Amino acid sequence: MTAKEAFNYGVYFLSCNGVDEAEFKSLCLVCRLLDIKNSEYALHKDDDVIMKKFADLLWRVKNGEPLQYVIGKWDFYEREFYVGEGVLIPRPETEELCSMAVDYIKQIGKCTVYDLCAGSGCIGLSIAGACPDSFVYLVEKSPKAMAYLIKNAQGVDNCSAICADIRNTDSMKSADVIVSNPPYIRTADIEHLQKEVRFEPAMALDGGKDGLDFYRIINDNWFDMLNSDGRIFLEIGEDQADDVLNLLTNFKDKKVIKDMYGNDRIVTAVKKD
């Protein structure tokens, strides 16, 4: 079967099974098998595809497994990151958090950065790549996520992966910048998320009863880890801006930035003197 025939069948199969974005997902799966970028499909549409392998991927998507897990990697910022079961999938909104942190770090030059709840490392490793004068510590608790983080960090010299709970700051060095996309979904809301999202690890989603547990930890445990005028960049849920601002009692110059969809998404703040 040619790639074009496989693509057409994939669109038909996914559409018949109620899967959204059937054309995009079928294209991604075909290109995954051909080991090419989506943009290169037109040059390879007559290449052969092994139907059994393609069908296996289609069934995984049909059963609700995230496309990113099925493919095994996903674009974020300026590179690809390996992802799979046990790690949070990089999202476009988080690229905005990353970009904002990069712009600031480029201004201050040589500095120490922490990426808390680092997951795949997409934020911290992107910062390390874009800001070679920085050194980035990536802190992640989950052993499954750490496996992807370490794999993604290969070849990045100005970083260090730390398997630890962010509640414990012992032996941690002081920092100039802290960036984090922490778990912020309310515990009771997790069971109502889309099926694909529920494939992602609960540890990376569950922010406690009110969704704010990790912002409390950052305010209470990490402000002392910041150097004078140290800055934080935090991703938040779209309805959490006021609550997060109120929780950050150890910080000043607090600001909320909206994402590309017009939703409150990022909080920045500076350590109080």
Image (cartoon, helix red, strand yellow):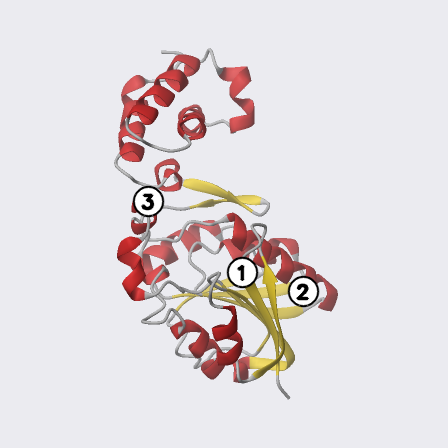
- Numbered tag placed on residue 105 in the rendering: 2
Q: CA distance from mark 3 to mark 1?
A: 21 Å
- Numbered tag placed on residue 265 in the rendering: 1
> Which element type, helix, strand or loop, lies under badge 3?
helix
Q: Residue furthest right?
A: 107
Of the residues shown, which amino acid type is indicated by label 3? Answer: Glu
In the displayed structure, does residue 227 sit left or right of residue 3?
A: right
Of the residues shown, which amino acid type is indicated by label 2? Answer: Ile
Q: Which residue is mark 3?
A: 196
Q: Earlier in the sequence, mark 3 or mark 2?
A: 2
Residue 257 location in percent, x, y? 61, 62
In the displayed structure, does residue 181 sit left or right of residue 104?
A: left
Residue 43 location in percent, x, y? 55, 16
Q: CA distance from mark 2 to mark 1?
A: 20 Å
Residue 188 location in percent, x, y? 28, 64
Of the residues shown, which amino acid type is indicated by label 1? Answer: Arg
